[in-house]
Amino acid sequence: MAQLDTWKLRCEMIGHEADVRSVNSTSSGSLVTASRDKTVRVWDTSGGRDFDSCKILIGHEYFVSCAIELPPCPAHPSGAILSAGYDRTMSGQTIVEPVINIWEGESIVGVLKGHTLTVCSLAMTAAGQLVSASWDKTARIWDLNTRECVKVLTGHEQAVWSILALENGAILTGSADKTIKMWDNGVCTKTFTGHTDCVRALALMPGLGFASTGNDTTIRLWSLDGVTLQEMKGHDSFVYCLAVLPTGEIISGSEDKTCRVWRGGECVVSLPHAGSVWGVAALPNGDISTACSDASARVFTRDAALVAEDAVLAQYEAALSMQQLAAQEVGGVKMSELPGVEALDEPGNKEGATKIIKVNEKAYAYSWNSVESKWDQIGEVVDGPGGGGGGWRRRRRRRRANDAQRQDV
């Protein structure tokens, strides 16, 4: 195999109709993706460069947050797919319950209920139990033979975003309360502190400990006794996901529209995307798969023989160029036309009047405070999907960190 110095696009997996929220590899070499289009897809390769959609799992009533493989077990001798969904709540009434579906083939053969808000992460333990994390501030351990919840892990003060099952049987949970907790037999035995915002993802680092990341944009490497071994910085916005390559290199995905590869504490590769990178997966051969808000999943490779054809690479580069052009506008306003900080020298004409200014190529919104006769910063102005106008970064950060009531995260 001729190995390249960096990763290049291998293929794009197109078929979902909304954000692809997660991607995971299976023991057979397939990939499984979950999407806000309410479906799960399984993608297979016949040994070539492309992954083709071979199954579409339809049955969720609302957005699907994540999907993983269930290895063969007594209750499912041929294995299965597990997928978790969002809740849908309107005016205080639950319209759609958050459920975990068990799939064999393209059929739902079991449903796990118990969480009261969106189930956002799933993991299998070495003992064959399922662990789920939820915006309801709990994690749950499930016996898949009886399909019953056997333990509820309570102790976090905000949404539980991530789960990691350790080789020694312990479980780690990461939360919007900025902490990571270790659990043994359902009891919290240690709390890891250090992150300054929501903890969104955890990944095992064999022989060292584990890695964590989140809304504070840092990636931390921890020993299991709670010591921070390393802190990595480089992303420009929230980091949503982590995985570890067979080489020990860390891969991360972020709202800054990049997937990054980290080696020795340094970012060595940044792979641009046309949207937020919600999920990453490490393939056994060292390839990287990503799940993106542009409704596509992708695979990147260092194997020269598997790199996409020139036409596919050109199409991908064109999509990136279009995204970069769109980034020159925010909220429908051209960045080049926004005033600088000097615009704040002019008082507002009424309480609550707003003004957008440009600082270091970013747009910030301010509101006029007539009581104190000054402009109060609301936050960074960000676009929504497709560049159709968004909201203030501070408002988004608060809702995401505090938890759970956001249906669009």
Image (cartoon, grey):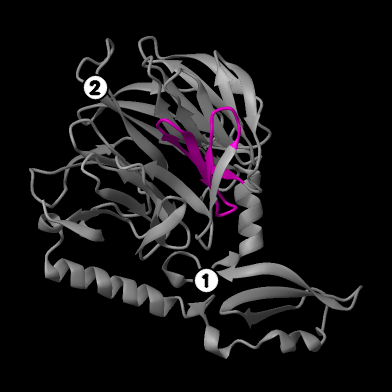
**Picture residue at 23% right of the left edge, 39% below the top:** 284
Nearer-the-camera pick, 404 or 287: 287
Percent of width and height locating residue 17: 31, 54
In the image, 96 versus 135, the foreground residue is: 135
**Disc number at residue 79?**
2
Q: Does residue 60 appear anywhere in the picture?
A: no
Q: Looking at the image, which residue is at 54% across and 13% down?
A: 185
Instruction: Residue 101: give its label.
Output: none
Looking at the picture, tell me which residue is in the foreground, 107 or 6. 6
Up the image or down, 339 lies above or below 154; here it is below
**Circle 2: element type:** loop
Where are the magenta residues, as a range? 198-227
Residue 233 placement (x, y as % from top left): 53, 57
Is residue 216 rendered magenta in the image?
A: yes
Q: Which mark is residue 389?
A: 1
Q: Is residue 145 magenta?
A: no
Res. 284 visible in picture: yes
Callout count: 2
Is residue 42 positioned above or below 116 on the image? below
Question: In which quadrant of the rendered view does residue 366 lie?
Answer: bottom right
Q: Residues within 10 Å of mark 1 (few under 14, many from 20)?
A: some
* SS state under label 1: loop
In the image, taking residue 351 as reference, residue 336 lies left or right, namely: left
- Name the amino acid type tagged 2: Gly
Quadrant of the image occupied by residue 76: top left
Is 200 left or right of 158, judged from the image as shown?
Answer: left
The kind of residue tagged 1 is Gly
For the residue carrying disc 2, how many other residues have a C-alpha within 10 Å: few (<14), some (14-19), or many (20+)? Answer: some
Q: Where does residue 24 sit, x and y in percent of width and height?
A: 31, 39
Left or right of 203? Residue 282 is left
Residue found at x 65% / y 74% = 364
